[in-house]
Image (spheres, coloured by chain):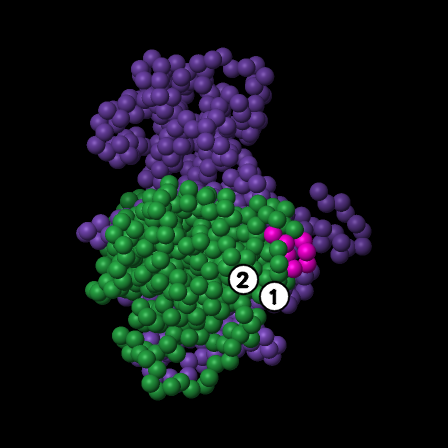
Amino acid sequence: MSYLKPLFSHPKLPKNKIGYTLKEYEGSLSTLCAGCGHDSISAAIVRACFELSIEPHRVAKISGIGCSSKTPTYFLGNSHGFNSVHGRMPSVATGANMANKEMVYFGVSGDGDSASIGMGQFVHVIRRNLNMVYVVMNNGCYGLTKGQDSATADQGSISKSGHVNPFQAIDLASLAIELGASFVAQSFSGDKQQLIPLLKAAIQHQGFAFLNVISPCVTFNNNPGSTKSYDYVREHIEATSVLDFVPHQEEIKTQYDEGKSTRVELHDGSEIQLNKLSMDWNPEDRVSVVSALQNAREKQEILTGLLYINTEWKDLHGTLNTTKTPLNRLKEEELCPGTEALNQINIGFR
Amino acid sequence: MKKSVNDFIVRFANVNGTGSASANYLFAKTIFRMGVPVTPKNIFPSNIQGLPTWYEVRVSEKGYLGRREGIDLVVSVNPQSMAKDVQSVKDGGYFIYDSTKKLNPDYYREGIHYLGIPMMEMSNQAFDDPRKRQLLKNIIYVGALVKLLNMDEDTIRDLISEQFEGKKALVDANNKALSLGIEFVESHFDYPLPFSLEKRNLLENKILVDGNTSCGLGAVFGGATVMAWYPITPSTSVAEAFERYCKEFRKENSGEAKYAIVQAEDELAAIGMVVGANWNGARAFTATSGPGISLMSEFLGLAYFAEVPAVLIDVQRAGPSTGMPTRTQQSDLMAAAFASHGDTKHVLLLPATPKECFEMTAESFDLAEHLQTPVILMTDLDLGMNDHVSDPFEWDERRTYNRGKVLTAEQLENIGKFGRYLDVDGDGIPYRTYPGTHPTKGSFFTRGTSKDEYAAYTEDGAAYKRNMDRLTRKWDTAKKLVPEAVVYPSTNSSDLGILFFGTSTFSSEEARDLLAEEGILVDAIRIKAFPFGEEVEQFVQAHRRVFVIEQNRDAQMRKMMIMELDCHPQKLVPVLNYDGMPITADAIKHQITTYLKQENSASHELSKTSV
């Protein structure tokens, strides 16, 4: 167990704009291994939702199967959650989203869940630009079945048992960009400073927001020679930018050098402000993003931060042109054509 | 040949993709409009263009809508299948062929009449456009049938005008082709044939429609807002019909849609979307066929355990792969009823007519939400893709949707602690909440197993068992909620019974009459759902032998009855058909009489050889 939760909270815990404390955004006690990267990501999700003042019950958490897919129990306890079928979270999220366009959808998955058994659904949910946050807690191995290599394990990476992975790795972030994901970011579970604003931007993004978060498996993949260990990731991490998320109608406080900073406005009026660390990269230019990722790979670096964003593409509801009222709230008088219409239909079949 | 009225079978042998379907439909629809019961069946290949395809039309004054053996007339316009088609005509029957080319002497056969019509030549002379020549050739043979079978000419010309409304050139061309056929018969043959048509008023307000269209329409009336599907014959036209009716009835003036249809990447995703949407409080469904059921099995199990409603329409077809799967069967029963791993059982509905496809699709949403479980509508290719004479669709203006036990924010305020899987009412059905209902009450985590009554994670075996026992109680509740079986009048007059369902219905009813003609009286029951209600159990108990009629090899329904009703296997006698063609009354009668003969001979000391 990662940590024990106190049974009571301090009466003076800070509250957010809608009057909730951080407690209201927490979940049950984690049953993952102590030090698991996933718990840090859960904590970042709690913090991001708290700071954005999202009503907890307006969030739905959906996952597949695996260590990562267990985490929705450990954050946002006042939200509905659905631990579904291995590799099939995207389809459940798609259906849920079609039913009610007004909620925030968190899809939580792992590298086994998304890059192997669920690759088909991962690919197709991107094509549809479903309005959701898709987090992959990526540790390069199958934790719950005790440490087998996953499809994101780097070629040459050494597992705890000394096995050298002979296969090419699937780079989910590159793939997502290639497939046309409208928001792609990469981060590290050990970098809260970066992860929280990225999560906030992903939540506010109207469309498919993909976060590939390297999240070391302390039990099976944290050994020397592994390219998904805490030490290796810390040594090889390279950020695209320093990123601020500025909610709608809030004053922009941070000042960056002219020329190096970029702003991206989101649908709800909030902004992402980026101080670029790499000058030949532009988050709104797919070609530059792809080449930045390729260059990083050449140098054995892990590029993190916001990689790509497109705020113009329609999400699936936009494409299907669905009505403003969520479909699950339509009543039968709006849905059933009625007896007279049916009589006319009968006439057409005579 | 003895003269007969309104009692014959015509089979058209065509080449797939040559426009024969609309000509053949015109033929069948004319008979329907003449007020005479008619059953058209498509026998088509897994192909878009080029392979043989047949269209078989049975006309029955007595209203028998199943298939029958013995073809009175073949219209052959496909050289590929001609050798076989000649053989398919019954003795004394008629064979119409395109005599533009001389008939191959190999195709001559004793005992049938040959009527040569130079259709291609006539069409080539009358029309310039090559595509039109091919299409209208089909109308020429329909024109010939108008005379040969004494079809009502005004009716067929009205239908042509309706079909091509607003396209005068097409109406004229079709009428011209029709006249060519009519005139050819008038100047070359004696007419009408010994079997022919007479106008009747036997159909009153009936409609002619296919089951898939009816299912799509039923889903619109039943309030489905989300459909996810993956193309697969023979279910695809369910999705197409749903979309067509949604576009007609579910668009705002602004053009915004009160529905969402997603063509999924596969059947796994299709059912995943359906489960996700239902979980979130929308009525969602999918349509598929056998291979889709296989792929959906894992999700169906999850939905059963997690108690998420889902509606699935399974248009059954023959076995795996491609080819035979464009033929009909009732062979997914067990795969659907027990789809998935672990202890799972699913509710099945068994429609027999387009009207029931409509009603049961609408009802399946009520049942799925009331029972919080998947409901699978088992239709088949024969019902789904062929036009059937049916009672008209009905919808009671006062009917309301049964959304099941769903708690509102106000109710959550007043009930104390919410337990998602608590059996509050003793019927095994717990209360659920939609996501987003209340800021601090009613949220829960949905998972397959490993939960207690309050949806908290537990691997406690006792909690698991309690949950499984509650699901059994829910299954018992389902028995009382599903549509009741139809027990035919004059039942319990015999110690023999026949049991049937779905598209075996019409042939079974006819077989019952055929048996009665031979002095064999059998009681009958048509089941409409799984699990079986009390009436099914009583019927089985009340009879010495029950013939279970179904269209698969393994007698799947019979096995399900043995499992669920705990009756002696010997009591249930399988009557089967599994060649991909709809079951016929003759086949049913033959199997039953053969069984009875053998039983008789076995009960005597002297053994008789029964053929």
Left or right of B567 on screen, residue B170: left
Question: What type is the residue that disc 2 sits on?
Answer: Tyr
Q: Earlier in the sequence, mark 2 or mark 1?
A: 1
Left or right of B194 on screen, residue B336: right
Image x and y of residue A320, in percent: 30, 50
Quadrant (top left, top right, bottom left, bottom right) of the C terminus of chain A: top left
Q: What secondary structure is the magenta-colored segment mainly? A: loop
| Category of crowding for the residue at label 2, using alpha-carbon neighbours closer than 10 angstroms: few (below 14), some (14–19), many (at least 20) | many
Q: Which residue is mark 1?
A: A219
Q: Which residue is mark 2?
A: A230
Give the residues drawn in magenta, as a range: A157-163
Q: Is residue B524 above or below residue B121?
A: below
Q: Is residue B135 part of the magenta span, yes or no?
A: no
Q: Which mark is residue B84?
A: none
Image x and y of residue B105, in percent: 57, 14
Image x and y of residue B453, in percent: 50, 78
Chain letter of the green region: A
Q: Residue at x 54, y 52 (%)?
A: A152
